[in-house]
Image (cartoon, rainbow, N blue to C red):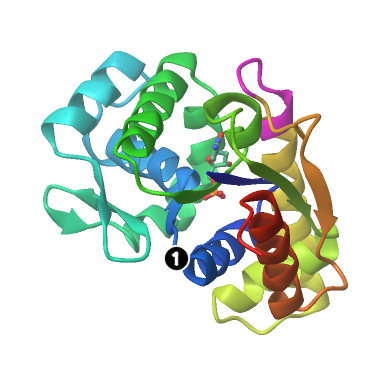
Amino acid sequence: MIAIDGPAASGKSSTARAVAERLGFAHLDSGALYRGVTLVAIRHAVPGPLDPARVLREAETRGLQLQFDGRSYAVYLGGASADEAIRSPEVTARVSAVSAVPEIREWVTERLRRLARAGQSLVVDGRDIGTVVFPEAVLKIFLTASPRTRAGRRITQRGQAVDQALLDREAVDLAARDQADSARAVAPLRQAPDAIPLDGTDLSFEDQVARISALARERLGLD
Ligand code: DC
């Protein structure tokens, strides 16, 4: 088990996926499941204040699931891939608030642990993987990058041209989400005491993946 935590758009998921591929592990993006629950809340829950029990009931009955595609776990809802829907601006705007609710965190954490008990070796990315969900992980990385770098990556990922105004706006949105994720009472975004910090601002993607993979091989005794 390898845990990669860090703030929004630090490159956790793409890095975790590539590290998993190098090691022959499966990749599990825990944020995707929080996004799936948020999608259920938007699509199927009653309007008004969030009712976590209702949202989780809807998630169960409508078949919100993580399904393995041979490399990564992907979010499915009602038998169809929800991969695109969970990345929508509406979901992104609400996911921090939904993921701050203790009952929802408990539900997601239990699902993640259940998957891990199935026995596959995993690279898991998120905010509280090394601190709360899998404190026994053999390697914990806390991945960061400067706000500008992260904002630029997010814009490019969306296929937009990077300009100053957009960079500023995106950096403000990311900072707000990081603040919400770090300030919540339950399982806030925090570096585990035994995590290795890695600042990817000046690293190429390949270097980042190579460094983490090398650390993992060392810890796992694969060299
Ligand atoms: O990694 P992401 O941006 O897809 O995550 C979406 C949200 O889910 C993020 O704002 C915080 C929350 N999250 C969390 O609280 N704990 C995790 N382990 C993963 C994500």
- Of residue 156 and residue 45, the one placed in the foreground of this image is 156
Q: In this view, does 161 lie above or below 179?
A: below
Q: Residue at x 69, y 33 (%)?
A: 189
* Image location (x, y in percent) of residue 160: 60, 81
Q: Which residue is drawn at 58% across and 35% down?
A: 129
* Image location (x, y in percent) of residue 153: 68, 71
Residue 220 located left or right of residue 78: right
Q: Quadrant of residue 170?
A: bottom right
Q: What stretch is highlighted in magenta?
A: 181-187
Q: Which residue is drawn at 67% across and 44% down?
A: 139
The secondary structure type at the circle numbered 1 is loop
- Which residue position is annotated with label 1? 24
- Of residue 182 and residue 114, the one placed in the foreground of this image is 114
| Quadrant of the image where one finds ligand 1 | top right
* Image location (x, y in percent) of residue 188: 67, 26
Q: Residue at x 64, y 60 (%)?
A: 217
Q: Quadrant of residue 51?
A: top left
Residue 136 located left or right of residue 74: right
Q: Is residue 200 above or below residue 123?
A: below
Q: Is residue 206 above or below residue 185?
A: below
Residue 78 located left or right of residue 223: left
Residue 138 is one of the magenta-drawn residues? no
For badge 1, the amino acid type reads Gly
Q: Is residue 76 visible?
A: yes
* Image location (x, y in percent) of residue 64: 22, 40
- Of residue 157 and residue 27, the one placed in the foreground of this image is 27
Q: Are there few (<14), some (14-19), or many (20+) residues within 10 Å of tag 1?
A: few
Q: Residue furthest bottom?
A: 161
- Of residue 117 and residue 28, the one placed in the foreground of this image is 117
How many labels were placed on the picture?
1
Q: Is residue 9 visible?
A: no
